[in-house]
Amino acid sequence: MGDSRNLEEQRREENGIVYFDRGTLTGRNGRRYDRYAIKTHFVEVGEDQAELVRKYVLPISRPGDVLAFGAKVMAMCTRNVKTKEEVKLGFFAKFMARFADINATGVGMHEPYKLQMVIDMCGLPRVLLAAFVSAVTRPFGVKGLFYKICGKGVGGIDGFYYRSSFERYKSLGLINPPNPVELCNALTKETGIPTVLMDANDIDQNQLGKCDTFPLTDDEIQDAMADNPSGQGDELTPLILIRPLDA
């Protein structure tokens, strides 16, 4: 998704809204989906998520469309964030981050502040166990055990990433909101468009929660988001309009 030539070919504009046509995917049950990645401004802490939908989504949506809302932007809107000043960096986070393997523990675990947030959330003993098991199983090609052992939503911690295209994310940690279903219900009620909260990347499309009236099944959501239409973070496309084409 990051190729500039492909982005230019995908670029569309309608009613003053810039979006990228990610093409049509066919799901396992034969249902097809058009997906449109909507470009926004850089969303800051405390912005109104409903206002974002009214500004960027409703001008181009049609009856029957549904919305995948990016978890990182929702975290910003709902203030589920921490600054470096709020994270008390300890010895173990600084020490363990030096030996973190991105491929084994995920992008960001080599960032001391992010690792400290994991320790604060799960407790040091569990994190030490997860790191040990991850290191032992790494030579056998086993991945993801660090997150599975830590649990408690650790995979939803983002930010404090010095390679980020945005300076703001280099000094800010984000945590997936703890009440995704309630947030989706409220957003759907305010805007009229069924909403699912997604924490998606090029490896996983994690569905955090959806509104009670969402018309797609969990499998259909995964089918529609299978190729991560959100693209790379620097594209500023956290809102994905999904248009089911047939039953």
Image (tube, grey):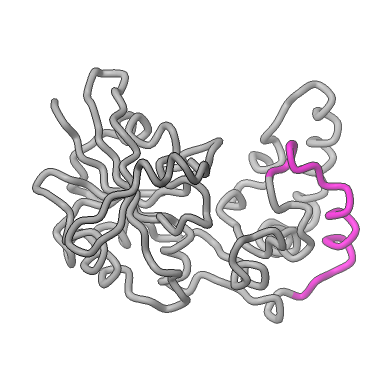
Say above or below: 236 vs 245: below
Q: Is residue 212 left or right of residue 223?
A: left
Q: Is residue 83 above or below residue 140?
A: below
- Estimate the x, y position of residue 162 in percent, counting from the top left: 72, 63
Q: Residue at x 22, y 49 (%)?
A: 212
199 sits to left or right of 63: right
Residue nearer the viewer, 168 or 217? 168
Quadrant location, the C terminus: top left
Where in the figure is residue 197, as x and y percent of width and height?
A: 37, 52
Residue lying at the far bottom of the rendered structure = 85
Residue 82 locus on image (x, y percent):
61, 73
Numbered disc total: 0
Magenta residues span 88-106
User: Would you say residue 210 is visible in this rendering?
Assistant: no
Residue 180 sits in quarter: bottom left
Whether residue 183 is situated above or below residue 200 in the rendered picture: below
Coordinates of residue 93 in the picture (x, y in percent): 83, 61
Q: Based on the displayed image, in which of its 4 quarters is residue 161 positioned?
A: bottom right
* Residue 225 covered by magenta stretch: no
Q: Is 32 situated left or right of 28 in this image?
A: left
Q: Residue at x 31, y 27 (%)?
A: 25
Which is nearer the eye, 154 or 23?
Answer: 23
Q: Residue at left 55%, top 53%?
A: 156
Q: Is residue 42 visible?
A: yes
